Amino acid sequence: MKSIKELKVTELIINKSTFVNYLIPVSSLLEVEENRETLKKKYNDASHHCFAYILGNNQEIQKYSDDGEPSKTAGYPMMEVLKKHNLTNVLNVSIRYYGGIKLGAGGLVRAYTKGCANTVGISTFTMLANYTELKLSIPFDKIGNVEKYIRDNYNLLNTTYDELVNYTISIKSSSLKDFNLKMTELTKGKAIIINIKTYDKYE
């Protein structure tokens, strides 16, 4: 699965109707609603606020709205664009200012599809990766090479000291085997590694 790094906006004019399309990274239903409310206030004079969103690492939550446009001419085609690009944790909102010329059902589908696709087309994607947070404990006399290696290659979250030096580190789960081997090498087998948790994040 992939998502997008940052909010993107495009504008499309078809037969005097203006379509302002927002593609927004979101991680919860609350963020979806907050962004929709913000856009409703910003464009409170628009004819329609149509939307589609997908949430969850496996696209578990999907919803769309035509907001007064004929059924499945706005939200549904935007949803299809998002699914076609295998996106999740995204909200697409298309704000229409009616220009006085009816586009017909086919014209609306093409307009909303194009608006969403144009915005996806200028977006920077982020891929979902699995990470492991772990605790590494080493003797004090092994700090030099170990700490430099950690800082150069991984995300050091915290360091504490007792009888040993304890590092809390976040690393890609796919790098665990190499990390363990390197720690064994640098500490001559004295490293103690405990996995705390695994989690997914976009990068």
Image (tube, rainbow, N blue to C red):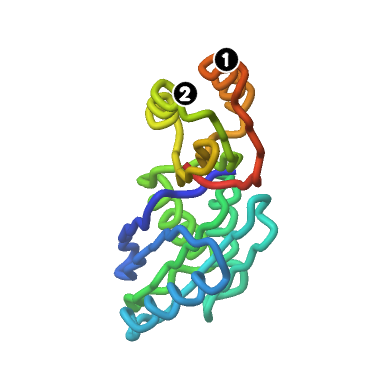
Which residue does the image show at 52% across and 76% down from the upper left? 69
Circle nearer the N terminus (2, 1): 2
Density class for disc 2 (Cα within 10 Å; few <14, some 14-19, many ≥20) is some
Q: Quadrant of the N terminus?
A: top right
Question: Badge 1 is on which residue?
Answer: 188
Q: Secondary structure at mark 2?
A: helix
Density class for disc 1 (Cα within 10 Å; few <14, some 14-19, many ≥20) is few
Which mark is on residue 105?
A: none
Q: Is residue 100 above or below residue 181?
A: below
Question: Residue 177 versus residue 10: which sits nearer the camera?
Answer: 177
Q: Is residue 101 above or below residue 112?
A: below
Relative to 18, is 103 on the left or the right? Answer: right
Which residue does the image show at 49% across and 70% down from the upper left? 31
Question: Residue 199 versus residue 134: which sits nearer the camera?
Answer: 134
Relative to 121, is 182 on the left or the right? Answer: right
Q: Is residue 195 above or below residue 179?
A: below
List x then y, in percent, for residue 132.
60, 40
Mark 1: amino acid? Lys
Which mark is on residue 142?
A: 2
Question: Residue 78 versus residue 149: which sits nearer the camera?
Answer: 149
Compute the Cα span from label 2 to label 1: 9 Å
Which residue does the image show at 60% across and 60% down from the upper left? 55
List x then y, in percent, for residue 46.
36, 81
